Amino acid sequence: MQLRAAIPALLALFGCTQASEVTPVQKVIQLMEGMLAKGKEEKHSEQVQFAAFKQFCDDTTVEKKRAIEEANEQIDMLKADIEKCTATAAQLTKEIAEHDEDISVWTGDQKAATKVRDIEKADYGTLHQDYSESVDALQRAIAVLRSQAHDRKQAVSLVQVSALKDLALIPESAKRTLDAFLQQDPEGLEVSAPEAHGYEFQSHGVIEMLEKLQDKFIDERTQLEKEEMNGKHAYDMLMQDLTAQIAQATQDREEKSEAKAKALQAKADAEGDLKDTTDTRDADQKYLDDLSATCEQKASDFESRQQLRAEEIEAINKAIEIISSGAVAGNSDKHLPSLAQQGGSSLAMLRSDTQNKMAQSRVVQFLSTKGRELNSRVLSALAERVSSDPFVKVKKMIKDLIARLMEEANEEAEHKGWCD
């Protein structure tokens, strides 16, 4: 009897473990609704974060593409500058070589002209001296012959006349005439007085010849002086022109050498800039490629996660729908809250608990299946949480105790019946 009296108390105790304000089904529903809200919140948060990341990707991609495009344009300009500087330096090198050749030729012309001029000047000096000496000798000879024509004593020396034969400019015909004239004077120096009146002076023809030679030499000397003056002037003009050409060529060469140095320096600077720009462009291109790959991967991952979260949310909604169905919810609301007051309906309470267990198992199975299909750790974890029950051990202990008490009550009833 004591055992029978204890059974309602144990059943009441078992009912108390589940007769709280929230039923197990409601607790599972609250758990899943909490997970649902958290999933939606995380899905939205991830959308916001991805939107910011996508904006960063778009902005950075535009910036890098613009930088790469500008770098490519700069590279083309630098290559063109390098080609231009190279061509300019080559052209200037050629022109400098031409100036060097011109300067060399003109310097050679100066030396050659100076050498010719020195020869001409020396020849002029010699010839001019010969003309001057010849004119002077002729003047003296003519004076001697004229004085002889007026000296009736015939005592004038003809040495000056004889000296004309030694002059290089005196023609051979004139020298023969002088020899013939000098041979007419047997004494060579003077004539005796008795013969003076009988001697006819024959020097008029010689004097005339010498005067013509004198005039000729004077004219030729004058012409020689003019030619010398013209030659010197031509030489001076040539030297002035050559000097000016050499000076201009030297100046042009120096300017072009300086321009060549600047062109080569500009080429070197452009090559340095080209290397820096190319390295920067390549680095930007690599960064852009890596960024594009990262952004594409993250976008793909985002889409996958969003789809997964959407499917998780759908699965949780379906689980809530399953466990919130009219039959399960109705039985739970009908039986579980009243177990504490209705000890006599303990068996009905046990049946209700069994129904709840079945519903809970269906939800756990559904969540576990979806978790495996979607490879969702969230649904798998939720299935584990739904399957767990903090009162499992207590209820098991109570159930075992009730079963044992029931067995003892049955044995006691059988024993009493046998005794009766």
Image (cartoon, rainbow, N blue to C red):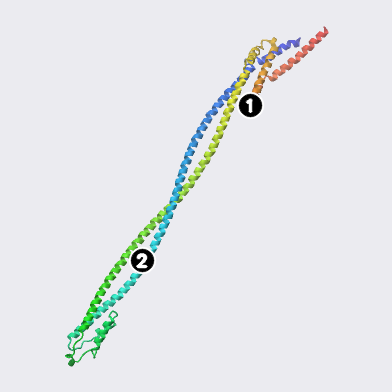
Q: Is residue 162 visible?
A: no
Which sits in the foreground, 261 or 103? 103
The residue positioned farthest toward the right in the image shown: 419
**Residue drawn at the location 28% of the way across and 76% of the way down:** 129
**Residue drawn at the location 72% of the way across and 16% of the way down:** 399
Name the residue that disc number 2 marks: 110
Q: Residues within 10 Å of mark 2 (few under 14, many from 20)?
A: some
What is the spatial separation of the Cα atoms under label 2 and label 1, in whole angstroms? 106 Å
Q: Amino acid at mark 2?
A: Gln
Q: Amino acid at mark 1?
A: Gly
The residue positioned farthest toward the top in the image shown: 420
The residue positioned farthest toward the left in the image shown: 197
Tell me where residue 172 sits by quadrant.
Answer: bottom left
Q: Is residue 399 visible?
A: yes
**Residue drawn at the location 51% of the way across and 41% of the way down:** 285
Instruction: Assign a secondary structure to mark 1.
Output: helix
